[in-house]
Image (spheres, rainbow, N blue to C red):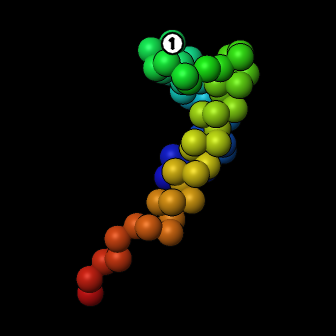
Amino acid sequence: MTFPITVLTLGLFYFVLNGLMFQLAASLIPGFELDSLAAAVGGALVMSIVATVLHVFLKPRRKK
């Protein structure tokens, strides 16, 4: 649920850091390849959006 806050505060470093983690994963996992840092940052952005959408739709309901 941090994606909207990150966008509002222009937390671009957060996406760059996640992109670097994507590149680290690509260097450790055979078959997972990235062409550039921009591709890694784009993947981090997509992953954040998907996580936010899943959190909205799959959050547990509170019992009253």
Residue in view at x 57 percent, y 42 percent? 47
The amino acid pointed to by label 1 is Ser
Which quadrant would residue 48 be assigned to in this image? Answer: top right
Can residue 31 be seen here? The reply is yes
The residue at the far top in this view is 27
Position of residue 28 in the picture relative to residue 17 (left or right): left
Position of residue 62 in the picture relative to residue 38 (left or right): left
Can residue 9 be seen here? The reply is no
- Name the element at disc 1: helix
Q: Nearer the viewer, residue 46 or 31?
A: 31
Residue in view at x 64 percent, y 33 percent? 43
The residue at the far bottom in this view is 64
Residue in view at x 69 percent, y 32 percent? 42
Vertical placement of 51 versus 46: above or below?
Answer: below
Name the spot of residue 51 as percent of width and height, x first.
Answer: 52, 51
Q: Nearer the viewer, residue 43 or 17?
A: 43
Residue highlighted by disc 1:
27
Q: Nearer the viewer, residue 14 or 41?
A: 41
Name the spot of residue 52 as percent of width and height, x first.
Answer: 54, 54
Where does the C terminus fall, quadrant-wise?
bottom left
Position of residue 36 in the picture relative to residue 64 (left or right): right
Which quadrant would residue 41 be assigned to in this image? Answer: top right
Residue in view at x 51 percent, y 65 percent? 56
Which quadrant would residue 39 be assigned to in this image? Answer: top right
